[in-house]
Image: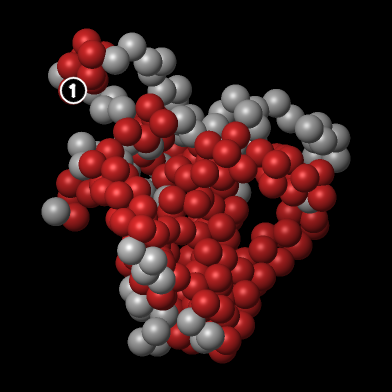
Amino acid sequence: TSIIISLLSPQIARMTGHFGLGYACYLPILIYLLFKVKQKPKLSYSLIAFVITVFSFLHLYFLLIGLVLVVSFFVYHLAKRDYLLAVFNIVAVLVPFLIVKTTLYLSDPILDRPESPFGIWAYRATFSGVFNPPFKPLNQILRAFINYPGPTFESSAYVGILGLPMLLFAIYFIFKAIYKKQNLISRFQSSEFMYMFFAAFLIWFIALYYPLKVIIDPALELLPPLKQFRSLGRFSWI
């Protein structure tokens, strides 16, 4: 099962020519450590900070992808009122950022990077990139019934054949809970897995760009260095 899950990783495609992003073990390591936070919080968050720092020096996108994933659990800790774990979370985020930022400041000779590089809206995730089978024969069968644009290289993050049914089930679950006036927040608080699913869904909205455009654009103006991370589609790997 672990081999099949690994082969589903969109990072596998990076092994053909974008080697720095081809380390498909990165996100599973972080997710595993996040699930272990309750049992060994200090050790887990120390290892998270270490892993993010090491992989950030392999490729800077690993820094921001890791920070976004870990910060999503900061919200989870606050919702459960685990304030000590929330503090550990912030420290685990700040340490890699400060180490990488300081290293780049002292060693990077490039001073004239463009302030607004092209790509934020172009290299984003798409619905077809996540739910469209990239290979034959499934993609041919779908295209026989539905005519839709194929995914670009940066938007490809196929979640598997069960991805779309899972999405439809999640939408059904949410609307059913709302109809029955159930407390959705308590459902997400009761399980790290449920919260991880919810967090991944929100991060996917960031990768899509347009659903959260009104939030992303002001954030980019407030924090201009974020514009250098112009391939939002890579966040759909989470």
Q: Is residue 126 above or below residue 228?
A: above
Q: Which residue is mark 1?
A: 138
Left of 220 or right of it: where is 52? left
Q: Residues within 10 Å of mark 1 (few under 14, many from 20)?
A: few
The residue positioned farthest toward the right in the image shown: 111
Q: Is residue 173 above or below residue 215?
A: below
What's the residue type where badge 1 is placed?
Leu
| Residue lying at 63% horizontally and 29% vertically, measured from the top left | 121
Left of 37 or right of it: where is 94? right
| Residue lying at 77% horizontally and 45% vertically, measured from the top left | 218
**x, y percentage for residue 86?**
57, 80
Q: Nearer the viewer, residue 171 or 48?
A: 171
**x, y percentage for residue 94?**
66, 70
| Residue lying at 80% horizontally and 55% vertically, measured from the top left | 105
Query: Picture quarter containing residue 145?
Result: top left
| Residue lying at 53% horizontally and 64% vertically, measured from the top left | 72
**x, y percentage for residue 36?**
36, 78
> Which secondary structure lies at badge 1?
helix
Q: Is residue 147 visible?
A: yes
Q: Is residue 188 visible?
A: no
Q: Nearer the viewer, residue 193 or 11?
A: 193
Q: Nearer the viewer, residue 175 or 33?
A: 175
**x, y percentage for residue 177?**
34, 61
Q: How is the image coloured?
A: secondary structure
Circle count: 1
